[in-house]
Image (cartoon, rainbow, N blue to C red):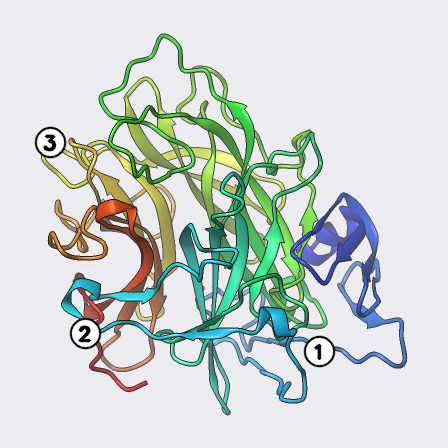
């Protein structure tokens, strides 16, 4: 039984709406869009999307891959034979007209490529959790970045948005929700179902391109794995920690604060264009893919940042983090799945480093990429030092399972100097492997500076040396 049959047999009615509001579904047999109407056929060997309207044509980004489902996936959208369609005649909604974000070249803004949105936008208060994908075709280069944001007018709720770029440096963003299949802006909001696990916050963790050779679909399908939070506060009475633990991570502009831990769980949504999303209901009663561990297990408080890697046919790996109460450290664990929906936990793979290391109090927000050059797995993750400081480090594994080795005891990217926009902490890394003889890597990350300044930055490896990253300040062809 392949992944497509499993996926279709677990769905009933999927609605893609032309707004940031998405519908949750379980066991769908039909897939309905308000602008274009489609069906999902229930076939053992195919997941097919058909237009029910003769007057409406598909207006979606289409992707395919040359590799066979039985071969190992390279885990890079640059390997996809992406067919990017032209939509020059499509008009944007005037209220959501995208703007071009140009990074500053000043020394205090080194590395910054994506700042907070304008005062009236959905992401004017906070941005983070960048998930960046690069698509290549014979005609053009296209970059997508999904990220979370929060506005000044609605500070209690996060949304997920999409920005696009032709070079991964200058980004187009929208001030509101997407209106067409080529828009930028918000693409997913918190659930309005009172019983759901994602009513207060949603944050993207990974977008996996499930192309035709992976799920035997007629065109590419985007699978978004995300963290969802509710208003349920985790009871930590009787436990004392050496640092302030918070979930989700937030920046407090006032000096005094107390940490609050809200329960978070992993979720899944699918899309054909990366803009209109349908939640896929998991086995947990809240709609999440799975629950936290029992009271004595390391992941009993919350599940966060479910980042998924397609290893091969019937083998997907999820990397996520939680806080081990007994050890008093953040830890990264792994789960495996045959279909991307039902998961089996395998335990911890990254715990706290040795005394004085950048990750002495553990790691979180992992990003795992399979190296196209040697097949090894490379993990960038956010390390917490003994004083609560955060920096980004790297670990490597041959099989991507439990045999992980830190590349060094220091972080490869640390907070900048006193005047930098990211002078307090850096984290939530996202790795993108570039083409070329030097095997260059880009690392997108969330930075926090003095006064609570927040943005998304980019660092570049020193050629093929993945142990050394520098903040981007220009200097390569765009």
Q: Residues within 10 Å of mark 1 (few under 14, many from 20)?
A: some
2 relative to 72, above or below: above
N-terminal label among 1 and 2 = 1
Please identify the quarter of the rendering in which residue 62 is found: bottom right
Within 10 angstroms of label 3, few (less than 14), some, or many (20 or more) residues? Answer: few
List x then y, in percent, for residue 251: 33, 40
Q: Which residue occupies 17% across, 50% down?
A: 411
Label 3, secondary structure: give it.
loop
Q: Which residue is mark 2?
A: 463
Task: Classify mark 1: helix, strand or loop.
Answer: loop
Q: Is residue 69 above or below residue 342?
A: below
Residue at 61% over, 53% down: 188
Q: Residues within 10 Å of mark 2 (few under 14, many from 20)?
A: some
Residue with the mark numbered 3: 355
In the rendered view, tell whether residue 18 sits above or below residue 136.
above
Question: Considering depth in this image, is 26 or 218 the residue closer to the camera?
Answer: 26
Query: Which of 22/65 is in front?
Result: 22
Image quarter of the C terminus: bottom left
Q: Residue at x 36, y 47 (%)?
A: 366
Q: Position of residue 462 (x, y in %)?
A: 16, 70
Q: Position of residue 470 (x, y in %)?
A: 17, 66
Q: Nearer the viewer, residue 57 or 62?
A: 57
Q: Earlier in the sequence, mark 1 or mark 3?
A: 1
Label 1 or label 3, whichever lies nearer to me, is 1
Q: Which residue is mark 1?
A: 59
Q: CA distance from mark 3 to mark 2?
A: 30 Å
């Amino acid at each position: 039984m392949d992944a497509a049959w499993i996926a279709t047999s677990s769905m009933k009615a999927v609605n893609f709406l032309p707004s940031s509001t998405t519908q949750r579904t379980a066991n769908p047999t039909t897939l309905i869009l308000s602008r274009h109407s489609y069906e999902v056929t229930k076939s053992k060997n195919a997941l097919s999307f058909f237009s029910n309207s003769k007057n409406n044509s598909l207006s979606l980004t289409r992707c395919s891959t040359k590799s066979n489902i039985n071969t190992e996936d390279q885990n890079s959208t640059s390997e996809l034979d992406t067919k990017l369609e032209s939509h020059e005649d499509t008009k944007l909604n005037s209220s959501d007209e995208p703007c071009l974000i140009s990074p500053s070249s000043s020394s205090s803004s080194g590395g910054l490529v994506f700042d907070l949105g304008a005062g009236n936008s959905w992401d004017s208060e906070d941005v983070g959790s960048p998930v960046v994908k690069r698509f290549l075709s014979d005609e053009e280069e296209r970059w997508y970045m999904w990220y979370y944001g929060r506005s000044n007018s609605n500070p209690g709720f996060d949304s997920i948005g999409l920005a696009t770029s032709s070079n991964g440096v200058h980004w187009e963003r929208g001030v509101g929700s997407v209106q067409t299949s080529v828009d930028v802006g918000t693409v997913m909001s918190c659930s309005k179902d009172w019983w759901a696990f994602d009513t207060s916050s949603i944050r993207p963790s990974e977008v996996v391109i499930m192309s035709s050779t992976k799920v035997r679909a007629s065109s590419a399908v985007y699978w978004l794995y995300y963290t969802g939070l509710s208003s349920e506060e985790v009871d930590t009475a009787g436990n004392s920690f050496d640092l302030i633990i918070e979930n989700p991570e937030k920046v407090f502009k006032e000096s005094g604060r107390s940490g609050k831990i809200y329960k978070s769980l992993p979720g899944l949504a699918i899309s054909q264009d990366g803009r209109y999303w349908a939640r896929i209901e998991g086995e947990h009663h809240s709609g999440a893919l799975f629950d936290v561990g029992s009271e004595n297990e390391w992941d009993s408080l919350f599940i966060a940042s479910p980042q998924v890697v397609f290893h091969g046919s019937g083998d997907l790996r999820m990397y996520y983090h939680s806080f081990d109460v007994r050890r008093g450290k953040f830890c990264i664990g792994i789960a495996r799945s045959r279909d991307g929906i039902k998961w089996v936990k395998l335990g911890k793979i990254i715990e706290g480093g040795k005394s004085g290391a950048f990750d002495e109090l553990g790691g979180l927000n992992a990003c795992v990429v399979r190296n196209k050059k040697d097949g090894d797995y490379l993990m960038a993750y956010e390390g917490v030092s003994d004083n609560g400081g955060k920096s980004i480090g790297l670990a490597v594994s041959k099989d991507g399972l439990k045999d992980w080795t830190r590349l060094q005891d220091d972080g490869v990217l640390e907070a900048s100097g006193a005047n930098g926009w990211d002078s307090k902490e850096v984290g939530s890394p996202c790795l993108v492997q570039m083409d070329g003889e030097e095997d260059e890597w880009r690392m997108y990350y969330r930075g926090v500076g003095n006064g609570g300044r927040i943005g998304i930055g980019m660092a570049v490896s020193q050629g093929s040396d993945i142990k050394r990253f520098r903040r981007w300040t220009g200097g390569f062809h765009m």
